[in-house]
Image (cartoon, rainbow, N blue to C red):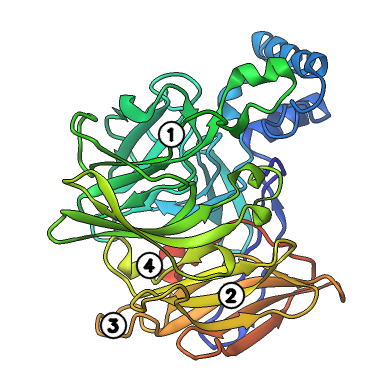
Amino acid sequence: MNNSNFVRKLVLSKSSQAELTLESFLFTSCCLHEYERRAGYPFVPGVLSSFNGSAAASVARLALAVARVVTGQFDPAGHGTSNVSLAMLGGRLLALSESDLPYEIRVEEDGDVVTLGQFDLGDRGLRRMTAHPKVDRATGEGFAYSYDVDRPFLTYFRTDSFGRKGKGVPINSVGDCCAVVHDFGLTESYAVFPVGKMVVRAAEVWRGRSPVGVDGGEKVERVGIIGRYAEDDVGMTWVEASGLNMMHCVNAWEEEEGRRVVVVGTNATEVGMFVEDFRRAGLRMERITIDVGGGRVTEREVLSPDSMDFGVINASYASRKNRYVYATITDETSWKGIVKLDLSLNGSDCTVARRLYGPGCNGGETFFVPREPNNPSADEDDGYLITYVHNELVGESTFLVMDAKSPTLDIVATVKLPQRVPDGFHGLFVPESDLKKL
């Protein structure tokens, strides 16, 4: 998670032939990389890796980092690697990580990918932003948040269709310390914040420990529900959800005219393993039903016995009830395949299709691309699933296109890539029409 960011780009032409433009692109214009390039060596401490070991060594690293800040060598407001996800916000293509502001990137006419720098949201006081903003496809509005080690710990905000940030809404009721809120849900009326046991406590550095860890006390996992256009957190609903440590929210929607909220997401049942190797964190896809007025969780369902994450849907169903979820499954050593879940089914296993990549193969997040994006009557699952897969046994990487509607997720196309593409975190499919507007 501390590694530098590379963006892999693949262009698919209209002639149904794969026009391959693959680039391993280092974000040399990230603030972190600029600092270290000027110094001639890496020195910015990694939150997850630089403060493990003896207390003396951790304090020494911290003191050195503070000295560099004081002398102007390093601005801690720009220490992220933007290696988590990609998003379109305000008509801009962004690379994101929650420890920094987004970085705007652009695909040039010759196919090159360039970094334009930190994306200006119009708020100089904003130091970082979630890697998982939500966008209303109808209005172009963005919905996002930031969390920090000082109060109010969590701040919710919106952006207009140009990406300009509005007034922030401090969520003072989130708790007495900084919780790691990696993702959130958005319905037509609410923003939904899962707050689990992962926390950030800067004081842990003095003990030779990473500041990111699991609260071992009596902290109870909760879900907070706030109005989508709220001006403050007065009236925000908090419900207890014991054992819910949601890593990724796949979708959220309302039922019964907003009296009930349903959230589908990945729960880390072994949250203590998440930082070390999140494939071993007991990842389970769950559906959580919340009675908003009653302030309680009425139902929790595990949707599959498989360990899985990186769930995606047909994006046109975002914030409204959907039927299908596509998720990457893991055997705790590799991301070995993909499953299709049917949320209309009852029972402990909603799996209706799966595809395993084969021995030695490791895949990344898939993305759903509708076959007819402008056809409102098209079936929800009428489209393609695309992903990168690397075969470690033969040292070969491929780009896969699968039929999302078929019962075995049939492979439609396999594109052999000229160089290794390791599995990463999150990706994005950008239609040609949007790409030309950048």
First in sequence: mark 4 or mark 2?
4
Q: Position of residue 42 (x, y in %)?
A: 79, 30
What residue is pinned by disc 1? 146
For residue 315, which numbered disc appears in the image?
4
What residue is pinned by disc 2? 338
Real-space Cα separation, disc 4 to disc 1, in angstroms: 23 Å
Q: Position of residue 45 (x, y in %)?
A: 72, 27
What residue is pinned by disc 3? 375
Q: Is residue 281 above or below residue 325?
A: above
Q: Nearer the viewer, residue 255 or 348?
A: 348
Real-space Cα separation, disc 2 to disc 1, in angstroms: 31 Å
Residue 236 shows in the view: yes
Amino acid carrying label 1: it is Ser
Residue at figure coordinates x 55%, y 25% from the top left: 77
Q: Is residue 437 left or right of residue 228?
A: right
Q: Nearer the viewer, residue 186 or 239?
A: 239
| Pair 3/2: label in front | 2
Q: Is residue 304 above or below residue 119?
A: below
Real-space Cα separation, disc 3 to disc 1, in angstroms: 36 Å
First in sequence: mark 3 or mark 4?
4
Real-space Cα separation, disc 4 to disc 2, in angstroms: 18 Å
Disc 2 packing (10 Å; few <14; some 14–19; many ≥20): many
Amino acid carrying label 2: it is Ile
For residue 367, which numbered disc appears in the image?
none
Amino acid carrying label 3: it is Asn
